[in-house]
Amino acid sequence: MQLTAGNISVSLAGRQVLHGVDIVLEPGQVTGLLGPNGAGKSTLMRALAGQVAHQGRIEIDGQPIIAMNEADRAKMITWLPQARVLSWPISVRAVVELGRLPWHGWRRALSQVDREKCAAAMELLDVTGLADRPATDLSGGEQARVLMARAVAQDTPVLLADEPASGLDPAHQISMMAALRQLAGQGRTVLVSLHDLSLAARWCDRLVLMKHGLIAADGPPDEVMTNTTLRDVYGISARIGHDACGLWLAPLGLTGGESDNE
Amino acid sequence: MSRPVLISLLTVLGLAGFVLSLLIGPARIGPVDSIEALVAGGNEAAMIIMREIRLPRALLGVLIGFSLGVAGAALQGLLRNPLAEPGIIGISASASLGAVLLFYTGLAGASFLALPAGALIGAAICVLVLLAISAMQASTITLILAGIALGSLAGALTSLVLNLSPNPYASYEIIFWLLGSLKDRTMDHVWLVIPLMIAGWAALWASSRTLDALSLGEEGASGLGANIPRARVLVVCGVALCVGAATAVSGAIGFVGLIVPHLVRPLTNRLPGQLLLPAGLAGAALLTLADIVARTVIPERELNVGVVTALIGAPFFLWLVIRSRKELF
């Protein structure tokens, strides 16, 4: 489903964080959301997930999300926050099964379909072997994968994931991105915020760069990832190249120009 | 342990507490005679003891224990904190203050309803203030801090009343009531608390899905479609109904709401919403058994059950803490 956001503005504690952002997310694509700390990435994702009061309109296939109740929205949009919170030593399987909560009826019992979706999500994120361990005992990277599996189990047309790959080892970063591509390949609309530019360049179909609460660049990775844009948005220079597998990028140093990190 | 097995075991334990509570007491009536007097009547003295003394006491033990257990489990889930207990949001202190004020003014003797009514009004005022504050500033931390402040204020005012109390006998009566007891309650007390507690259980049960979702934090829960402000109101009102009603008829009984969730949590999948029923059943078992101890451990001199729960509860809690920090969660 297409997620359309027009002229989104958000103020937090009296400070305007987003200044009229327009973004359209297409199904079947992994869109990477990039930008320096404080650029407004998380706030934009929260607004798209209906988690923060905003001005402007956000629609899924023409249906305004503001008109949906929380439960219906949770069947359309999965929101994976950046903060990885696990309050009780719940088993990995039980955490993933929480993803089915929006789909439960009154009886709370998991159906066969629920169980299959959870098993598939755990398989996709390579956490099946951890299923019976308390999630609080796991390493940070393992917890990240468990929480992503929980998000995948929610099985909604739109998936918004805030920095799901941070803290993962390279192999699991790659398999996390591959998992997102697989989900997009099934027709889902995926938006993922990332700090790792080379990961973003390689694995996203489209990149959106934010700066100071506005969108600074938006397009396919090889159009967006230029030294001009990287200098303007991050204040860095990078070596950028193409090979048989696609775009690659290695940050080299600060450009010493305008500092964009707030 | 699977959930149906656990629930069945705890139900049996709760029923055992209830039956033992009926059978054990200073009047020596055999088990068969007890049940016969309770059900069929017969011997008039035995019938009065069973129907008017032991039955209300055993029923209140079950109802109050269940309520305190459920309320503790729900609050720990909402606040995502294993140290939360019904007292933390100030309800029991406010209910106690309401009752104490009635002692002080002498209205307590007017009717059997006066004291519970005072306690319920105290609890209701506390809830209204909490809800007003959480409507202004929607955050769970604000709720905890406001609850602690209200509880402390109610505690200070209770001390003030004791300070100003006209004679030592009045202070003694107040202190004794504050210790918590199930002694000399009647079926009227049972009928009074039943509707309040059922409403409280229903409110807490209605929040159970959100409590489960809150294991992933407030942001994570809200992404799962949980309505957190609604759950906050449900839990605060549910706890107030449970604990307000309990305090109204028994005085303050501590530690049950804190300990019971910890006792049963390791036997469940640890999701807070799914802990509610087991915690309630375990609370009923614990309180009825503690009440039996309270009235049998020293013959001739009955203890207040609030003293017994604290005496058992506090060291037990310490042991839990030392044994394994992990098991606390």
Image: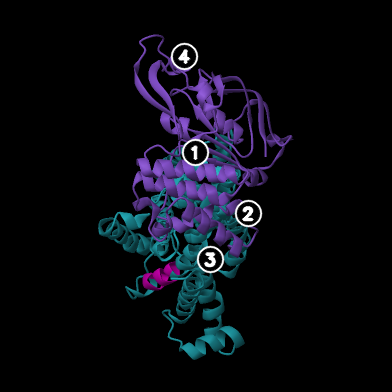
In front: B313, or A259?
A: A259
Q: Which mark is residue A228?
A: 4
Whether tag 4 and tag 3 are in contact, CB under 8 A, the answer is no
Residue occupied by mark 1 = A81
Q: Which residues are magenta?
A: B286-294
- At which x and y percent is residue A29? 59, 37
Disc 2 or 1, which lies upstream in sequence?
Answer: 1
Tell me, by letter, which chain the rendering colours purple. Answer: A
> Distance between the Cα atoms at labels 1 and 4?
31 Å
Q: Nearer the viewer, mark 2 or mark 3?
A: 2
Q: Which mark is residue B63?
A: 3
Disc 2 or 4, which lies upstream in sequence?
Answer: 2
Q: Quadrant of residue A76?
A: top right
The answer to whether residue B323 shows anywhere in this view is yes
- At which x and y percent is residue B172? 39, 55
Residue occupied by mark 2 = A103
Does residue A4 sit above or below A88 in this rendering?
above
> Distance between the Cα atoms at labels 3 and 1?
40 Å
Q: Secondary structure at mark 3?
A: helix
Q: Tell me the residue at 62%/57% (across/down).
A: A104
Of the 4 image quadrants, the one containing the N terminus of chain A is top right
